[in-house]
Amino acid sequence: MNKLFTHTDLDGIGCAVLAKIVFGDNVDISYCNYDDIDKKVNNFFNNTSNMEYHITDISINEELAAKIDHAKDNCVLLDHHPTAFGLNKYDWCHVIALDVETGLKTCGTELYYKWLVENSYLSRTETLDTFVETVRDYDTWRWVELGEAGMFAKQLNDLLYIYGRDGFIDWCIDRINLDMIHEFDAFAQTLLSYRQKDIDSYIEEKNKQMRVKKITIDSALWTCGVVFAERFFSELGNRLSDMHPELDFIVMIGMDGKISYRTTKKHIDLGKDVAKVFGGGGHPQAAGSYFKTDLVEKLIDDILTVPEKEEKERHAHQKWVDYVKISADSIKENAESIVGSEKYLKDMTVSIRLYPDELPEINVDRNFHPEKLFKM
Ligand SMILES: [Mn+2]
């Protein structure tokens, strides 16, 4: 059995596709994020001995790497995130951000592909090249620069979210085996067009909800568009940025505590100039930071709390409404006796005097036709 630890995004899953092509069912794959990779690898390290395992498109921390190195374990780590460059001091770690052959930014899937080929696990084919390049173009954002030609890479990522991880891996392997990975089958196309419609209407809706805010950071004044959002962050941010050339960048607030920043402008480095100031980080055109989720609680409280003054007024008003209702009910109940049996009643005035916190005072004034009285 072989073991692969890989990232959860398209690039990480591209590595899983390659592992399945090479090892078939004989590979156990763990999909990891930055918050659980160290725990999962450490667990495996403590409980398994002498098995070769690969870590792709994600890195482990320095401490764990030192432990693995000390044990002379059979581990290979392939990552392209510059934050992990420090791991290159270990000969089993290969953290490379730029491909010397193409001069382009590389990705986990491309690094793993080359490693598998160099170590004779896999033979290079045109179809696999296409698959790897597509994943790379998506992961390194080259697809945005490619314009129309980059759309395929973007849609491949969409397909991952439509089919889910396992369905998507099966689909990729099928298409690679058919030498058809460069295009979508009719069914995938239909699903993609539905998803695109969904994305388009979501963006339209968010565009209406967006609020413009000016913020000063280190004496630089930025104009940004702010929206609450829960999905399609990258596409939403990029499209809103394109739709609003007057805005420097777009801020998307997720209720999970994450704020995402996006721009299609070149004059701003969101990672450095914005996200970092709020305790986050990222790339020049896509960055993020976090806020404490208790702010969400506070926001909900603020929204759903009736202001004290209005509350009192509402109570005072309601009290008088209740008095009138009680008085009216009492008049209705006693109507028979109030009107009485007088034959000569000319008119009648019923007055109610209300006092706070006391029973209402009901007065009845009656006038009679005296002439009729005399005729009697
Ligand atoms: Mn990646």
Image: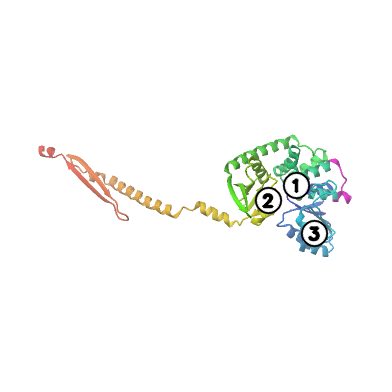
For marks 1 and 3 on the same chain, the one whose residue lies earlier in the sequence: 3
Q: Quadrant of the C terminus?
A: top left
Q: Quadrant of the N terminus?
A: bottom right
Between the C-alphas of marks 3 and 2, the distance is: 26 Å
Of helix, strand and loop, which one carries label 3? helix
Span colored in magenta: 115-126
Residue wearing tag 2:
270
Disc 2 crowd, CA 10 A, few/some/many (<14, 14-19, 20+): many
Between the C-alphas of marks 1 and 2, the distance is: 18 Å
Instruction: Please state which of the two labelled residues, at mark 3 or mark 2, is closer to the viewer.
Output: 2
Amino acid type at circle 1 is Asp
On residue 87, the disc is: 3
Relative to 337, is 242 on the left or the right? right
| Residue in view at x 80 percent, y 45 percent | 132
Relative to 350, is 155 on the left or the right? right
CB contact under 8 Å: marks 1 and 3:
no
Amino acid type at circle 3 is Leu
Disc 1 crowd, CA 10 A, few/some/many (<14, 14-19, 20+): many
- The answer, for residue 255, to whether it is visible in the render is no
